Image (cartoon, grey):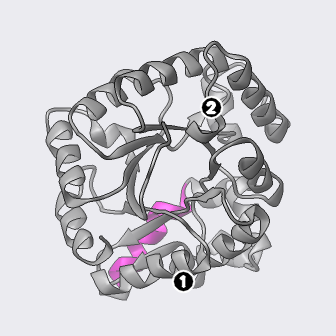
Amino acid sequence: MAVTVGRVGIWQGSWLWRGPEAAEAIAELDELGYGALWLGRADGIWDQLADLLGASRRIALVTGIASVWLESPADMAAHTAALTAAHPGRFLLGIGASHAPAVEAQTDQTYAKPYSKVVEFLDGLDAATPPVPVDERVIAALGPRTVKLSGERALGAHPYLTTPEHTREAREILGDGPLLAPEQKVVLETDPVKARALGRAKVSNPYLKLPNYVNNLLRLGFSREEIDAASDGVVDALVAWGSPDAIAERIRAHHEAGADHVSVQVLTDDDALPRAQFRELAKVLL
């Protein structure tokens, strides 16, 4: 059964969706009309996914992403099959190459040839019993080669920490048909000093120190000096801030550039679920 994620979803770290509030919060997202909840740092959270799916009735859940270095394709396929059997059409497996510091800190593997690792992992998902169908998986993709792969061997691409300009380029690579679902960070704050300070704090470390993201920004035309300094231009490109209407304009820009779905990550200065912001954004996005 095909998974439908709608036009707009929410992206938040999986660690925020634990505890007694999680069930109530995802049920509310469901009622508000968001199409999907993307869970970041999604390795080994299968029980949590089952609980969240059980606490809601319609919204899709997506791993954004599960690292191809931390679990075998066979195990990931088995968990995917179990979730899909229990909740048909509501779980989408998002996989990706992650980043060298995370992989080498968590495993005894050397982070090398990440593109080949993703291809090998996809081969494993195809060979598993049962396999993960192409239309039930997405790939974290920034560079042109991985974007192209995501259209050939998955439902589509999930670019993270990117811009409408990247969305336009990704759509040109994918062509019509494959899913294009970029993530967009947002700050509901109209004071530019406060908004940029929060945005800069969230993107500077670790994202602007990781080669995957740095190389993507270089491809988009930013200088190494701008990236290293997390300049206002870089922050404004990566983090939409302002009123709900200003946020909606950035989401619209992604859609106009070719996105089928945009996953909105609300940034705050604490680790609480930003449920008030979810409600406020729903009024203009859904």
Q: Position of residue 96 (x, y in %)?
A: 65, 40
- At label 2, counting other C-alpha atoms closer than 10 Å, the crowd grade (few under 14, some 14-19, many 20 or more) is some
Q: Earlier in the sequence, mark 1 or mark 2?
A: 2
Residue 54 versus residue 70: which sits nearer the camera? 54
Answer with the quarter of the image where residue 16 lies: top left
Q: Mark 1 and mark 2 in contact? Answer it, CB < 8 Å.
A: no
* Numbered label attached to residue 133: 2
Q: Is residue 203 rendered magenta in the image?
A: yes
Q: Residue at x 23, y 66 (%)?
A: 277
Magenta region: which residues?
Answer: 193-205
Amino acid type for the residue under numbered disc 2: Pro
Main secondary-structure element of the magenta-colored stretch:
helix
From the image, tell me which residue sits under label 1: 232
Residue 243, visible in the rendered structure: no
Left or right? Give the position of 44 relative to 72: left
88 over 286 or under it: above or below: above
* Count of number-bearing discs: 2
SS at mark 1 in the image: helix
Give the Cα distance between marks 1 and 2: 42 Å
Residue 255 versus residue 198: which sits nearer the camera? 255
